[in-house]
Image (cartoon, rainbow, N blue to C red):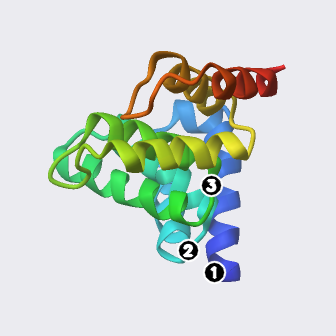
């Protein structure tokens, strides 16, 4: 990952979180461009945030598909939030980009949960409590994950 990618991502994130982005379409457009530059240069934060915005807030199918691919790239680089999102995408499927694959959904939820992502931990509790995603009901494992919620 390049210094420019990180700089673009952190700048975009700071602007995105400020009140400026909400008031001005021009600022919003420039912020999205910074996220894109950061994502294209390999910034995990940019891949995650830009991917999320494109996939869940995008206005057209192409944006949503590209967003899913950015989220997938961030998940592969170890981003817990993206791993959780990929778990959701693999669980529900988003053809033609992401197909419904229970094992991949489970693996992504587990990876996010192991990093302390609270919603992913709760999902692991539910998976083992209810025997979802092809897993048997396992009360001990469900309790182990539930203890991590604190």
Q: Secondary structure at mark 3?
A: loop
For discs 2 and 3, the disc positioned in front in the rendered view: 3
Task: Tell me the distance, in whole angstroms, between the alpha carbons under discs 1 and 3.
Answer: 15 Å
Mark 2, Cα crowd under 10 Å, few <14 / some 14-19 / many 20+, is: many
Question: Residue 96, relative to residue 126: is it above or below?
Answer: below
Name which of mark 2 and mark 3 comes first in the sequence.
2
Label 2 with label 1: CB-CB less than 8 Å: yes
Name the spot of residue 48 as percent of width and height, x first.
54, 53
Q: Secondary structure at mark 2?
A: loop
Answer left or right for 16 relative to 105: right
Q: Quadrant of the C terminus?
A: top right
Q: Which residue is mark 1?
A: 1
Name the spot of residue 135 as percent of width and height, x first.
43, 33
Task: Tell me the distance, in whole angstroms, between the alpha carbons under discs 2 and 3.
Answer: 12 Å
Name which of mark 1 and mark 3 comes first in the sequence.
1
User: Which residue does the image show at 66% across and 39% down from the upper left?
Assistant: 113
Label 1 with label 3: CB-CB less than 8 Å: no
Q: Which residue is mark 3?
A: 79
Q: Secondary structure at mark 1?
A: loop
Badge number at residue 42? 2
User: Which residue does the image show at 36% across and 52% down from the upper left?
Assistant: 67
């Amino acid at each position: 990952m390049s210094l420019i990618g990180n700089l673009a991502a952190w700048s975009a994130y700071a602007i995105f979180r400020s009140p400026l982005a909400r008031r001005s379409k021009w600022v919003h457009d420039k912020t999205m461009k910074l996220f894109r530059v950061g994502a294209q240069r390999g910034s995990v934060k940019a891949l995650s945030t830009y991917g999320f915005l494109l996939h869940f807030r995008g206005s057209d199918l192409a944006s949503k598909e590209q967003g899913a691919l950015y989220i997938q790239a961030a998940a592969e680089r170890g981003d817990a939030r993206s791993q959780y999102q990929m778990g959701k995408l693999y669980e529900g499927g988003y053809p033609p980009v992401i197909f419904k694959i229970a094992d991949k959904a489970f693996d992504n939820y587990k990876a996010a949960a192991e990093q302390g992502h609270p919603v992913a931990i709760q999902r692991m509790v539910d998976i083992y409590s209810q025997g979802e995603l092809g897993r048997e009901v396992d009360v001990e494992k469900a309790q182990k994950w539930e203890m991590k919620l604190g």
